[in-house]
Structure formats: structure tokens, C-alpha cells
Amino acid sequence: MAESKLVIEGGHPLRGELTVQGAKNSVLPLLSAAVLCDGDIVLERCPALSDVYAASRILTHLGCRCRLTQGRMEIRNTGITCTEIPETMMHEMRSSITFLGPLLSRSGSCTLYLPGGCELGPRPIDMHLHALRQMGAEIHESHGMLQVQGRLRGAELHLPFPSVGATENIILAAVLARGQTRIHNAAREPEIRDLADFLNACGARVSGAGTDTVFVQGVDRLQGCTYRVMPDRIAAATYLAAAAATGGSVCVQDCCPGDLTAVTEVFRQMGCRVYSHENRIYLQSSLPLHAAPYIRTMPHPGFPTDAQALLMAAHCKARGSCMFEETIFDSRYRHADDLIRMGADIRLSGRAAVVHGVQRLSGTTVHATDLRGGAALLIAGLSAEGITELTELSHLDRGYENPEHVLRSLGAKIERIT
């Protein structure tokens, strides 16, 4: 496949309105949940992302029929005909591990491999496996292959960390298990709530999603439904950060402002005017920005780790200094090297990074090393002087639907060249 790159002419303030895409971090577990449902499922506002296509290939391999047309994903599940997901399919995306819970719960046995995705340091699935063992699963691990079997039953589960992936996998495993499952210290991210709402629309009995204690009462079967995927809060944060960094003004429509409170508060600290009304966020920026003193990533409702790179890019030309502390993942400052090549002043020390604002960034050739790091370099390119070429777009395309089209509609000078 031919490589593509984005060619960005910096220095053009973003202005206008955009409607945010469906949430990548929500639609992927919803696609995994399709394994559990009999009949037809329709997911509206489904973004056309490479990770969505990867999940669709897994569903097709398992026996489902999938079709994505203009934001509408149609899935027909007339029965799971295969219970092994090949290693190549598992390696295409990190969230492929969320097929483990539903496939085991539906079929009683399955074979999977350790997942792939962005390289953000170790993201062990020990919590997933420990929880499933407590629910009655027998799991054999060998050279990256997981052979799992067992009739699942409800259990009292205590997570050592509020892991989003583990919480999702447990919920997906528990909806068809015998009895009640209670998850303590569950993740509270909005995407957990969206998963529960979808499952309940299919006939599940999940309560407490969005709090730190989730209850799942097992049922005999789930049927398909039509469901609208929640808006992507990280995509919204990306375009807000791009507007802030370029001194622009944008209105993000069809979003959930309450899910972005931790991020919009940072924009206010930077001197942006931010207004929220119902399902819209309006941001007006005037340069130079002022550095927020300290940003620490935390589980929801704290500042999201997925927005860390975006705000780092927005801080590169802010007056003053900002200290970032990354508490969720290791290896999440890989974008910093290319920001420094563009002229940013960033000092790294373990999980901490200090950004000292500079007067200008200069366009150059940069490389996306992961999804959000690629978005950060895109933001930096929009605010830099001259031409920036962003390569390795396969990372960016995992989470953003036609970002160049969205940005051009706001006045950016940007082209995708193959």
C-alpha cells in the first residue's frame, strides 16, 4: 500500500463549526458486544476508522456480516461459527482484547492472541484474565496465545486500578453469565456508560455504569438493536486544541460538554474563552496563550491521558511553563522528539515533561509514532511557520475520520498526498 502524508501550511487560524465524529473508544467495545447479540444490530454515527474496519474483519471471521455505509454500521449475527481469532487480526489493534469476554461468554471457549495497537509501554491484561478466572474461566497462556474455556458465573470483583479495558471486558463477559457480577473500583469513563446503555438496549441488565461500582445481572440472551454511538470527546478536544494553538475560534457541535470539563478548564487557564451550551462547545483563542501551570493525567473525571499530547502541542508557544505528569501509561511522550525538532523547548524526566513556551515553531517533516502523538504533531504543524509534512498516517487514521477534510472546512491549508 502506498504511503500517505499530510502537507500542512501553518499560520492559518481555524474558524467555523464542526460536528464531531462518533467515539472510537466507544464504538470498538460496541462492535465486540455484537458477538453477544442475536439478529441485526445497527450502529449510527459509526466513524470510518481503520480500527473499526479491523474490528469488522474480526466479526466477519467469527461468522457475522458487516457493512458500513455513510456512518451506519449494520451487523447481522445469526450465530458464531468460529471461536478463534487469528494472531494477525489480534495484532491490528489494542482493543481486540475486548473480544475475549463476549466470545467466551457466548461460546464457552475461545482462542485468542495478545493484542497489538499503539506502543505506549506495557498495558498488561492481567486484570482481564484474573477477573475471568474468578468468574470460572480456565485460561492457558502459551507464547502469546490464550486458550480459554468455562461456563461463566457472576462474581464479586475488585480491580486494583480502574482500567477501562478490564471494566469493559468484565461487563461483556458478565451479561450472559449466571447470577450477578459486581465490579468494584470500575472505570468511570463515559465510554463505559455508552457500552452499558447499548447492552441494556439489547436486553442486558447493567447498572451503575459511570460510577465506581457496576452491577451486572446475567440474562439468557441478547437481541440486536439500533443505537447511536456517543460523540468522540478526544476528537473534540483535538479540534479545540488546534483552534487554541492557531488563535482561532470554533464551535464543536453534537458533543457532550460535561465529558470534557477537565480539558476545557485547561483551555480557560490558557486564556481561551470557552462556553458550553447543551451539546455544543465554543472556544475563542487569542495569541499568545498562557501556560497552565500543571497538567496531571488521571482516570475519569480527571484529565484524560488521550488529551495529554494534544495539550502539549498547544503549549509549545504559550507564555510561561507547563509541567505534565503522565500517570496512566509509560512511553507516552514519544511525540516530544518531533515537537523539539520543530523548535519546542521540552524537558523530559521519566513520567514528567516540562514545556517552556517559545515564540515560534518551524515546519519540517515529522512522523506519527502513535495515534494521539500524531494528532499533537498535526496541531503543531497548524500553528508552525512554513510547511510541515506529517508521515506514518496509519496511526492517525486509527482514530480520526478524514481529519484533513474537517480542518479544511475550518480554514486550514492541508492536503493528503499519496
Image: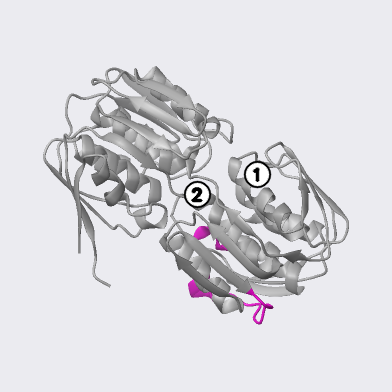
Helix, strand or loop at label 1? It is helix
> Between 100 and 414, which is closer to the camera in this rendering?
414
Which three-letter amino acid code belongs to the residue tagged 1?
A: Arg
Q: Is residue 313 magenta?
A: no
Query: Which quadrant does the C terminus fall into?
Result: bottom left
Indicate left or right for 122 with 187 as reference: left
From this viewpoint, is residue 139 visible? Answer: no
**Residue 229, horizontal then vertical, whole percent:** 55, 51
> Residue at 39% across / 46% down in the picture?
372
**Residue 96, horizontal then vertical, whole percent:** 56, 63
Q: Is residue 88 magenta?
A: yes
Q: Which residue is mark 2?
A: 23
> Between 163 and 258, which is closer to the camera in this rendering?
258
Q: Which residue is mark 1?
A: 193
Magenta extent: 77-96
Which three-letter amino acid code belongs to the residue tagged 2?
A: Ala
Q: Residues within 10 Å of mark 2 (few under 14, many from 20)?
A: many
> Residue at 64% across / 51% down in the picture?
195
**Residue 319, horizontal then vertical, whole percent:** 27, 18
Indicate left or right for 333 with 206 as reference: left
Helix, strand or loop at label 2? It is loop
Q: Earlier in the sequence, mark 1 or mark 2?
A: 2
